[in-house]
Image (cartoon, rainbow, N blue to C red):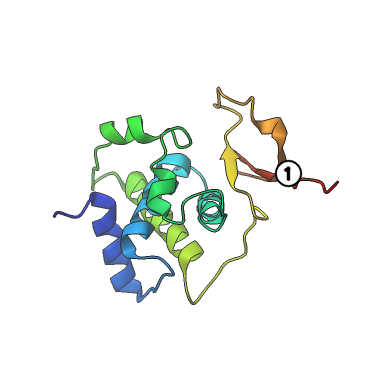
């Protein structure tokens, strides 16, 4: 079976940096891909925040533990149509940097050695309010951070009776 573009990219970066992850390389690849398509134009901080949000879902009992299953949910992650049209151009330096930074962000949030703080404060959801069309669900969540173009949210705690 051939490696996907992102799997090959992540595997090469892991080998060159000696990075070890709490996840298998295939899941780091899925995380990288989601970060790239959801936050490719954001700063490294913004990309890392999106990565943390996806990882927070994987650690919640409400979502699958496998990152690939989480980001594969087309009702939650809407980049899958853009992904079909994606063409990698190795001469496009801006694109290459966006992919490299997406992989760096994924490696940062899954690192065994160098954990970075979760600036989303445990968010399990994010939205770009500038382009989002389906926002009816947002008021049911607590806002935890605004980083770059993304608003980060987590579910409200249920109050005891």
Residue 148 drawn above or below residue 133: below
Horizontally, residue 16 falls left or right of residue 59, namely left
Q: What residue is drawn where x is 48% and y is 43%?
A: 39
Place of residue 77 in the rendered image (x, y in percent of width and height, measured from the top left): 45, 37
Place of residue 25 in the rendered image (x, y in percent of width and height, measured from the top left): 32, 63
Query: Can you identify the residue that label 1 sits on?
Result: 156
Place of residue 7 in the rendered image (x, y in percent of width and height, measured from the top left): 27, 56
Horizontally, residue 159 falls left or right of residue 34, namely right
Horizontally, residue 152 falls left or right of residue 83, namely right
Q: What residue is drawn where x is 38% and y is 73%?
A: 19
Q: What residue is drawn where x is 31% and y is 36%?
A: 83
Quarter assignment of residue 118: bottom right
Q: Tell which residue pokes out farthest to the top in this image.
A: 133
Residue 20 drawn above or below residue 43: below
Place of residue 41 in the rendered image (x, y in percent of width and height, measured from the top left): 46, 41
Q: What residue is drawn where x is 26% and y is 65%?
A: 12
Quarter of the N terminus within the rendering: bottom left
For the residue pair 69 and 92, the one nearer the viewer reads as 69
Q: Label 1 crowding class (10 Å Cα cut-off): few <14, some 14-19, many 20+?
A: few
For the residue pair 59 and 11, the one nearer the viewer reads as 59
């Amino acid at each position: 079976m051939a490696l996907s573009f992102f799997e090959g990219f992540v595997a090469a970066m892991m080998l060159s940096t000696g990075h070890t992850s709490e996840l298998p390389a295939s899941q780091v690849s899925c995380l990288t891909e989601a970060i790239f398509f959801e936050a490719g134009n954001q700063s490294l901080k913004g990309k890392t925040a999106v990565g943390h949000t996806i990882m927070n879902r994987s650690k919640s009992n409400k979502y699958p533990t496998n990152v690939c299953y989480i980001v594969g949910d087309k009702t939650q992650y809407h980049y899958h149509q853009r992904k079909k049209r994606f063409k990698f151009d190795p001469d496009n330096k801006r694109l290459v940097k966006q992919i490299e930074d997406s992989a760096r962000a994924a490696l940062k949030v899954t690192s065994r050695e160098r954990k970075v703080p979760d600036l989303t404060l445990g968010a399990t959801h994010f939205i770009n309010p500038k382009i989002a069309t389906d926002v009816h669900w947002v008021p049911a969540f607590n806002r935890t951070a605004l980083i770059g173009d993304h608003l980060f949210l987590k579910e409200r705690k249920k109050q005891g009776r």
